[in-house]
Structures are given as C-alpha cells and as structure tokens.
Amino acid sequence: MTTPGLLGCARNAGPRGAASGPPGQVGAVAQKAPMPPSEQQALSWFNVDKSTLSRALSELSSRGADAADVYFQHSRDNSVTMEDGIISRATTSVDQGVGLRCVIGDQTGYAFTEDLAPESMIAAAQTSATIARGGKAIAPVEFRFHDHADYYALPSRWSDVSIGDKLPIIQRAAALARELAKGREATIEKVTVSWADSEELVLIADLDGRIHTDLRPMTRLWVMLTARKGDVVQSNSANLAARRGLDWYTDARLKQVAQEAVDRTMILFDARRPPAGEMPVVLAAGASGILLHEAIGHG
C-alpha cells in the first residue's frame, strides 16, 4: 500500500542500499549514524503540519475534553528465509495510520484512519469527540517539540539497508551452523535461517501542545536445524534479537547463535521419556495455577 506517510518517510531517508564493509566484516555498513529527527523531519514522516494537528485537536475537544491526543504510527517489516542455501521467501509489509483520542472523565472516545489526508483526520476526530456533550473547543496555542534522547544509535536506518547487505549475514549463520555440527553424533540434514527487521515511526501530539516522536528499530535472526541419527530425526532452533542496527551482527554473535542451535538440536537425541502415571503436585499460593495450566493444560 502506498500512502502519503510512506512517501514522506522515504523523502527523508538516507541513500538506499547502504554499502557493505570489507569481506568477512559481517554487519559492517559505511554510513554516518543518524541524529534524532528534527521537528520538520518528524512531521514529514506523516506529511502533516502543525496547523493540521491544531485542527484535529480542536475537533477532538469541540464538545469538551479533559485530555486529547493524536497518535501517528508507521511500521515497516521485512523478512527473509533461506533454506539450505536457497532463499525461499522474502516479504515486506507496511502498516500506517493515525488514532485520535478524546477523554472525558472516565470515558474515552477513539477513532482511527489509515488515510492521513487532513479531511480524513478531521472526520475521525469528530467521531471520537461524540462521547462529549457541550463544552468549548480547545486547541494548543503553540506546539512544543520534545527532543528525546537517541536510545537506539544506528549506523543506518533499517529502511536504508538493502537485501544485499543482509544476505552475507544470513549465509554466514547457515555456514557456521554446519561447520559447528561437524563431528557431532548426528548429521545435519537441513539448515534454515530466518531474518526479520522492522522500523516503527511514532509521532504523538496532545492538547497541551506537546509533540513526542520515536523511531523504534528491531531485528531478529533465527537458526533452525534438522538432524538425523539413525532412524531418529530431531529439530530445534536458537535466535537473536535486539533494537540495534546491521553492525550488531558480529561474527562472534553469529557463532553464538549457531552453536546454541546445534547444541539444542543434538541434546534431543539423548532425551528420555519422563515417568508417567499419577503423581502428587504441590501448588503454592499465587501464580502456580498458571504454571500448571501451561505445563499440562494445552495437551
């Protein structure tokens, strides 16, 4: 889906296809670390300006409001799956919208739209405001942009990292898994590596005139193995995840997750059936009932 907000996001992105580092330097990207977004950059994520925010908040409080806010969100998710050296799946999805909330006492009116055109936002604001009766419209006299700390220092945004930069990491993880499994008691029959990265952009404006923004990265890597020992086949996996950038995937981390996947798979060949039959179960007060449910309630 192509939306105004997505176009606004791309307009402020850095150069596409960040260059990879030297061979063997897994996860290296030669780009300058982005600074926290400026006020104009954050507003352009969603192709919105302060006058539109003011109009939306005015409509939200048109019948009175104790509090009101406008919440913009844009999420971009990418995934790649490689099975035995072949890319079997690659997807990209984009979700975007704006939610508008009006609070009166203990009641909350809420509406949302995926269309970021001003008319759609105003219509959603009017719907949200219907919980209130009477009152006078309130709109911020002046918006104040809050410059938040950069909690996720990245060499480049995930939206600027190409598939060509991710493939060496995926291939290296698969190669390490096969290498580390050599000489073990079972033979690796299949190696699957799944990759995911996402980027979430958020902008919130409230009735007090505050504008808050956030850019939330996330990346995950799974290594899944299938091994055979005689007539017995076992499968298991391990994964890594962090709110970091491409440079986080060092060779040491890839070796760690590959080793964990190998160990988790091999230990299954030594598994024994647990004793069966009626046994006493002692439950303490508190959450023990939940643990019992999770242990046997899904059988």
Image (spheres, rainbow, N blue to C red):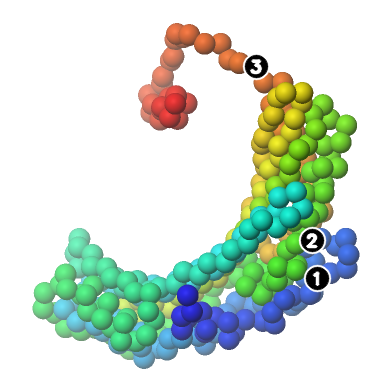
Q: Secondary structure at mark 2?
A: helix
Q: Secondary structure at mark 1?
A: loop
Query: Of marks 2 and 3, which one's residue comes earlier in the chain?
Result: 2
| Quarter of the rendering containing residue 257 | top right
Name the residue nearer the viewer: 70 or 140.
Answer: 70
At label 2, the amino acid type is Pro
| Residue reaching furthest to the bottom | 51
Residue at 73% x, 44% y: name it.
Answer: 191
Q: CA distance from mark 2 to mark 1?
A: 9 Å
Measuring from the top left, give residue 184's x and y in whole percent: 84, 30
| Quarter of the rendering containing residue 245 | bottom right
Q: Which numbered circle lies on residue 72?
A: none
User: Do tag 2 and tag 3 residues touch (Cβ < 8 Å)?
Assistant: no
User: Do tag 2 and tag 1 residues touch (Cβ < 8 Å)?
Assistant: yes
Whether residue 272 is visible: yes
Q: Which numbered circle lies on residue 20?
A: 1
Is the residue 206 above or below the residue 80 in the image?
below
Q: Which numbered circle lies on residue 272?
A: 3
Mark nearest the camera among 3 and 1 is 3
Residue marked by disc 2: 168
Mark nearest the camera among 2 and 1 is 2
